[in-house]
Amino acid sequence: MRLFLSLLAASYVLGQDLSRSILERKLISRQSPAPAFKTFSFNQITNHFPNDTFYGPPPTSATFPQNYILNDTFYRPGGPIFLLDSGETSASSRGSFLLTGVIAELAQATGGMGIIIEHRYYGTTFPELELIAAEGLTTDNLRWLTTEQSIADFAYFAQHVSVPGHEDEDLTAPGRPWIMYGGSLAGAETAFTVKEFGDVIYGGISSSGTVKVFTGYPQWYYTIQENAPQDCVQSIEDIVDKMDFLITTKNTAALAELKTIFGLEAVQDIRDVALTIAFPIGNPFTYPTNSWQELNWDPNVGGDDFFLFCDAVTSANKTFSAVDSQLSKFTGGAVWTNLGNYANYIKTKIIPFCPPGVSLDSNECFGTHNATAWADPNDFSGNRAYLYQSCLEAGQFSQGAPLGRRTLLSRSIQTDYSERWCKWGFPAGKFNTVPATPALERWNKYGALHIQADRLAQVDGGIDPWQYACVHSPDGFPREDTLLRPYYLIKQGGHHWDENGLLNISAEPDFIQAIHDYEIKFVKSWLADFPKWRANQTQTRSS
């Protein structure tokens, strides 16, 4: 869902050079640089729900240009259309999925066409473009960014698009089988689209679909605690436990010394310190390096920074071991095992992301308390849109584990820490107000962990930090795996690991080939039933 942040990226959207802070960097794809595909534009509806007072007065522009890219290399007349939701990034950055991975393999196996549609408010797809160019992404100008509007986009697109180069064919739904795919947030939207618009979208594959949202998401760390190297996990848990003791006892002298050990003495809020030292592990929202979420079976996708971090923390090198006893005087003589190694990693791998000469306490670096920075409406990189979705209806804010359970993130970080960003970032507008706490029912109303539908495949990863938000959650409801309603767990898989692939399919790991083969199998089964389904749809519409 939340992807790692590019700390040096700049966005050139609407003619602006928008370099961002560490906590506001552009969300980018976990892919290698994507191949260039021609971008096409579709005339999309701004407000699909004109009678809903939630959206205020009608938009100035009833429609807006929505970007999409396509690959028809494998297409044969009459073939299916595979629609990939770009999610919280641009369509072009997902372009590699038109050549390799599940969409490409499905298209090749069925004579289908692959299309990637750009999500509203991401990339360069903006409703009310002229108004936003003049005013920025104000609270009012973001009011059409909701899940229900987004999934309505996909159905409307499938019903009305005229694909360039194929104008002589009617490729629209429901006359042609449209099958969606999405991973993470896009996986949830895929599930919701099939559930809500099953008379238009014939089927969908929801991979690591975060169909259940929470205000706070401490569960993000649970999978890491269970599957990461245990010596590393225990070291960090022990250090965080001692840190929390100093916080709860309000030992300001000890906390000042702890900050200095990590090289973060300039950072005022201890919660900002706590979040920063957890960056190598990751969190549900922002971090500068590859974390557990970015692990991937393909070494060219994501990165193994997490294991390098763990190796550094648990290193037998005694260079920094003297630091381990430096705070013992504050914790009853208890040694902070591997604190020196941990602090050295933060100082050498994380702190350098802060630009030279800039205060570590600024929002540009590791501080988060500059309300003005959060309120900047001229962030078109994707971060502001993503934060708005989180504040409005998706939640999933960083949170330490509850008492009684070991934690990798300080318990000083609770949901109010992130909710400040919502208050600062989105002051009440004339037509739109962001709730004090996310309206989760707007997301969970589609079924949450119970969601299922015919021709809705739900694929998850057993080591995915988002697993507790997916249907394979340990708190979920196991169901039968069938061709009509596939329910598949890649046991050793991470975050939507089936999405990417290799040109040489035989070189993919066996467990990735297995899920790709299964996806081809059940999609072919669906396609065999399409004529009957289409006849039923035609009869229903005519009656």
Image (tube, rainbow, N blue to C red):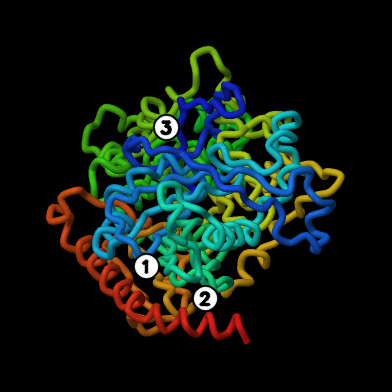
State how far apart marks 3 and 2 are (Cα): 52 Å
Mark sitting on residue 533: none
Q: Is residue 478 left or right of residue 330?
A: left
Q: Which of marks 3 and 1 is nearer the N terminus?
A: 3
**Furthest-front residue in this view:** 168
Amino acid type indicated by mark 1:
Val
Mark sitting on residue 451: 2
State how far apart marks 2 and 1 are (Cα): 13 Å
State how far apart marks 3 and 1 are (Cα): 47 Å
**Furthest-top residue in this view:** 357
Dot 2: within a 10 Å radius of its alpha carbon, few (fewer than 14), some, or many (20 or more) residues? many
Q: Do the residues labelled 2 and 1 touch (CB within 8 Å)?
A: no
| SS state under label 2 | loop
| SS state under label 3 | loop
* Quadrant of image for the C terminus: bottom right
Residue drawn where x is 13% and y is 52% of the image: 507
Q: In this view, does 392 lie to the left or right of 487?
A: right
Q: Which of marks 2 and 1 is nearer the N terminus?
A: 2
Q: Are marks 3 and 1 in contact (CB under 8 Å)?
A: no
Amino acid type indicated by mark 2:
Ile
**Quadrant in the picture for residue 104:** bottom left
- Mark in front: 3 vs 2: 2
Nearer to us in this view, 156 or 105: 156
Q: Earlier in the sequence, mark 3 or mark 2?
A: 3
- Tag 1 residue: 459
- Tag 3 residue: 326
Q: x, y percentage for residue 89?
A: 49, 43
Q: x, y percentage for residue 118?
A: 51, 47
Amino acid type indicated by mark 3:
Gln
Residue drawn where x is 55% and y is 59% of the image: 154
Q: In this view, does 69 lie to the left or right of 422?
A: left
